[in-house]
Image (spheres, grey):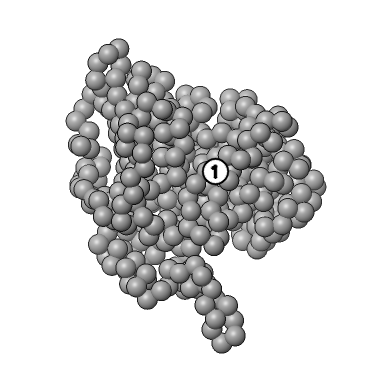
Amino acid sequence: MSKVLIIGAGGVGTVVAHKCAQHKDVFSEIMIASRTKSKCDAIAAAIGADHITTAQVDADNVAELNALFGSFQPAIVINVALPYQDLTIMEACLQSNIAYLDTANYEPKEEAKFEYKWQWAFHDRFVNQGLTAILGCGFDPGVTGVFTAYAAKHYFDEIHELDIIDANAGSHGKAFATNFNPEINIREVTQKGKYYQEGQWVETEPHEIYKDINYPDIGPKRSYLIYHEELESLVKNFPTIKRARFWMTFSEEYLTHLRVIQNIGMAGIEPVNYMGMDIVPLQFLKAVLPNPGDLGENYTGMTSIGCRIKGIKDGQSRTYYIWNNCSHEAAYKETGTQGVSYTTGVPAMIGAMMYLKGEWNKSGVSNVEEFNPDPFLEQLNLNGLPWHEKLDIDLEMD
């Protein structure tokens, strides 16, 4: 039984808190902290458990974080705040001697960069203090890395080709909305595409490469090759990979809105002076778009995220597909959030559980695929995200 501190009170933080509260035997005390305490209070009230407290904290301020860590004394911090804040929270964890877990890589606020180098640079310091830092423990990144590790452990001697496929076949009924923080989401999907081929990174224009992919219980969906951060760690940790790609579905309507947003400059991250005030266009856009945390009530359909893998076993060619489908309606019924928040928050809770149970606690900064996948996937089945697998099938990914 251990204390856990959740930093972040958006849709993902809501799911993490709900799921931690379901496991009082593991998470004996839960604190939810955010810049806006009222958001934390609302989550705690919705759950209605007596072992949840809340606090206000500025996650950009190491001193404030240390003060909070010192008063609450958590065993692990689950960071589901903004990716800009990863480094200050990691620094505070080091200074306060507390384990760390997040769901997304650090991003510089002034530049849309999706790289692990800033966080990997903390590795030796975490090793020297005997502390664990678990990076990218959402769904993608997160479960997709665990899926890959599971495939490597049980079905392959060498993985040669990895395609991560992510479909949101749901409808929220809005003209345009993002499924998580618009400031982060729009930066991610408007960047140039990139994939790994024979030891090299190949860059593409945004949404230049696409294909129709068949998703289980959904059918064919137009899917676009984009860059996603887990590719960087997966090709590092599985060096036999010759090709690694990430595909995500977008509707034509969504892409049309996105093009307009870009063309009129609203996706910009450089400040614009307006009536004597510096305003970042993308931050203003975030303020006027629907709150992703409020989309769940009318969300229908499902997500489907998985890994399609080619490689060899005992000298023979082999294929493997492992995936999860998540219902937006079921996610909302359980936690009051939509499926994208649910599929990110559940794995974060499980990663923290793995640490507290002694399954995932090696010193240093590690990505999820560096740990034993088996106990994690067992808990994934038990906590609302059942997974499925097929061997030696046509992956349709040439």
The residue drawn where x is 39% and y is 23% is: 152
Q: Nearer the viewer, residue 213 or 270?
A: 270
Q: Secondary structure at mark 1?
A: helix
Asked if residue 233 is positioned above or below residue 7 in the image, the reply reads: above
Q: Position of residue 197 (x, y in %)?
A: 32, 37
Q: Where on the picture, by quarter, is residue 305?
A: top left
Query: Which of the image's four quarters has the N terminus?
Result: top right
| Amino acid on which the number 1 mark rests in the picture | Lys
Q: Is residue 139 left or right of residue 359?
A: left
Q: Is residue 290 left or right of residue 278?
A: left
Q: Position of residue 319 (x, y in %)?
A: 26, 26
The residue drawn where x is 35% and y is 21% is: 158
The residue drawn where x is 70% and y is 43% is: 93
Q: Is residue 328 left or right of residue 252?
A: right
Q: Is residue 120 in view?
A: yes
Asked if residue 254 is positioned above or below residue 367 in the image, the reply reads: below
Q: Residue furthest bottom?
A: 275
Q: Position of residue 230 (x, y in %)?
A: 44, 40
Q: Where on the picture, by quarter, is residue 132?
A: top right
Query: Which of the image's four quarters has the C terminus?
Result: top left
Q: Nearer the viewer, residue 294 or 60?
A: 60
Q: Residue furthest top?
A: 314
Asked if residue 251 is positioned above or below residue 73 in the image, the reply reads: below
Q: Position of residue 24 (x, y in %)?
A: 64, 36
Q: Where on the picture, by quarter, is residue 354?
A: top right
The residue drawn where x is 61% and y is 44% is: 78
Q: Is residue 242 left or right of residue 137?
A: left
Q: Is residue 349 in view?
A: no
Q: Which residue is mark 1?
A: 117
